[in-house]
Structure formats: C-alpha cells, structure tokens
Image (spheres, helix red, strand yellow):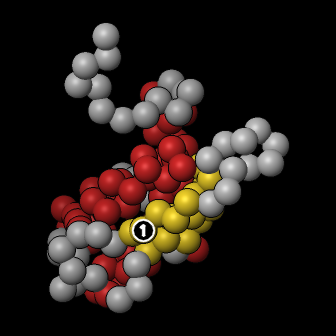
Amino acid sequence: MRKLNKGRKLSRKKGPRKALLRSLANNFFLHERIKTTEAKAKELRPIVEKLITRAKKDTVANRRQILRTLIPEMAKKIFVETAPKYQDRNGGYTRILRLSPRNSDGAKMAIIELVKQ
C-alpha cells in the first residue's frame, strides 16, 4: 500500500523527475505561462509557489536556495520582476487551466500561468 507518499512519479526515477521539474520551473519563469500535462502542472505548482514566496524576501540565503533550482538568469528575473508584483499577496500566485485532451495519446492537458496582479 502507498501510504503517505506525496507527489507523482511521472513515470520517471528520482533524478530525471527532478530534472524535468527544474526545467519546467525555468521555462515557467521565462514565459510566465506554459502548456503541459495536467499531472506535471499540478506537480509544478507547489515548487513555483515556494520559489516566489522565498524570493519575496531578498536575502543571500534565499538567493542561494533559489539558485539550487533555477538557472542564474531566471533567479535574477524572479527577484527583480516576479516577486515584487506579489509582495502583498499571501500565496496563490499560479492558476491551472484545463484544456482538451491531446490528440495523439489522449493525455489531459493544462496551462499553468501566473495570476495577474
């Protein structure tokens, strides 16, 4: 029985799954909106929300923590552009919009985007 195991495996082992989510996070902050499968969007949401919450307080420790996940260009963008927009908001920075299934394999698709301030 799978009890108290949080998160989805996304049909990958730990390393490739971590790399996938990092790549999705970098692309998300680059475009501020990405189209992906619903499962990946649901897994990405808590990662992105925690990064934005951490970036709201600009300290050396927070910069280093964010650089563990994001590339330097995206880390700079999150501190300079994204986090200041949500300074007065306590969470709920993203929204997931469900789309029609993908034609090729019928996978549930979704768009994850930043909520406008």
- In screen coordinates, is 33 left or right of 50? right
Residue labelled with disc 1: 95
**Where 40 falls versus 26 (above or below)?**
above
Q: Does residue 12 show up?
A: yes
Which residue is at the far top? 1
Amino acid found under the numbered disc labelled 1: Arg
**Where 36 falls versus 51 (above or below)?**
above
State the residue in front, 27 or 95: 95
Residue at 40% across, 78% down: 115
Residue at 30% across, 32% down: 6
Tag 1's secondary structure? strand
Quadrant showing the C terminus: bottom left
State the residue in front, 76 or 49: 49
Residue at 47% across, 29% down: 9
How crowded pointer 1 is (Cα within 10 Å; few <14, some 14-19, many 20+) is rated as some
Q: Quadrant of residue 77?
A: bottom left
